[in-house]
Image (cartoon, rainbow, N blue to C red):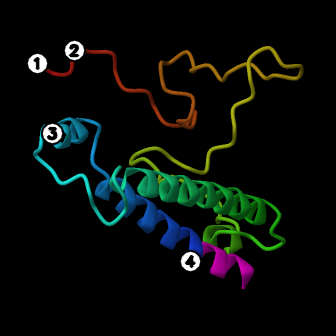
């Protein structure tokens, strides 16, 4: 409740501060008034509104600074999460990547080379047939392919 009220006051101070800064005229405007371009006897006195607006801007800036620090302190010492994102459940684990075409996915892992108990890779039989072809299947004749 306190934080909400303080936030509303903070926003109102910000808008008032912006408005006051935009209302004030720069130092060059005083030079024009000195040569008769402006009326120096205004509602705020002979000096014009400069001192009143400057003091008001300083007060509003100080209040804005104090509300900023107070809001930061309250936000840092809050018991509940400050963001909706912090209240949500943890993210689900990433899905497994889609299998590549033509690559079998049920192969056992290959142990790194040099481990104890490593078996020698299967060698092709003397007939030139691959290792996964049963021995009772005759090997293809060694020719040039019939051309």
Tell how many labels.
4
The first of marks 4 and 1 along the sequence is 4
Badge 2: few (under 14), some or many (20 or more) residues near its Cα, within 10 Å? few
The first of marks 3 and 2 along the sequence is 3
- In the foreground, 25 or 120: 25
| Residue farthest along the bottom direction in this orientation | 1
Q: Position of residue 146 (x, y in %)?
A: 15, 21
Q: Secondary structure at mark 1?
A: loop
Residue at image point 83% right, 63% down: 77
Labels 4, 3: front one:
3
Q: Which mark is residue 8?
A: 4
The residue that mark 3 highlights is 32
Which picture quadrant has residue 143? top left
Give the quadrant of the C terminus.
top left
Q: Is the residue 136 above or below the residue 147 in the image?
A: below
The first of marks 4 and 2 along the sequence is 4
Residue at image point 33% right, 16% down: 142
Badge 3: few (under 14), some or many (20 or more) residues near its Cα, within 10 Å? few
Image: magenta residue range: 1-8
User: Distance from label 3 to label 2 (Cα)?
Assistant: 104 Å
Residue at image point 49% right, 36% down: 137
- Residue 10 is inside the magenta segment: no
The residue that mark 2 highlights is 144
User: Contact (CB < 8 A) between labels 2 and 1?
Assistant: yes
User: Distance from label 3 to label 1 (Cα)?
Assistant: 104 Å
């Amino acid at each position: 409740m306190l934080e909400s009220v303080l936030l509303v006051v903070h926003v109102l101070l910000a808008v008032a501060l912006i408005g006051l800064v935009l209302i004030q005229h720069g130092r060059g405007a005083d030079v024009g008034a000195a040569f008769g371009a402006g009326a120096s006897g205004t509602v705020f006195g002979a000096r014009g509104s400069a001192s009143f607006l400057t003091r008001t801007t300083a007060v509003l800036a100080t209040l804005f600074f104090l509300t900023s620090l107070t809001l930061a302190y309250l936000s840092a010492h809050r018991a509940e999460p400050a963001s909706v994102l912090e209240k949500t459940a943890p993210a689900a684990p990433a899905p497994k990547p889609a299998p590549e075409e033509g690559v079998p996915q049920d192969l056992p892992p290959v142990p790194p080379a040099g481990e104890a108990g490593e078996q020698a890779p299967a060698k092709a039989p003397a007939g030139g047939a691959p290792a996964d072809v049963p021995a009772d299947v005759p090997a293809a004749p060694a020719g040039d392919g019939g051309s």
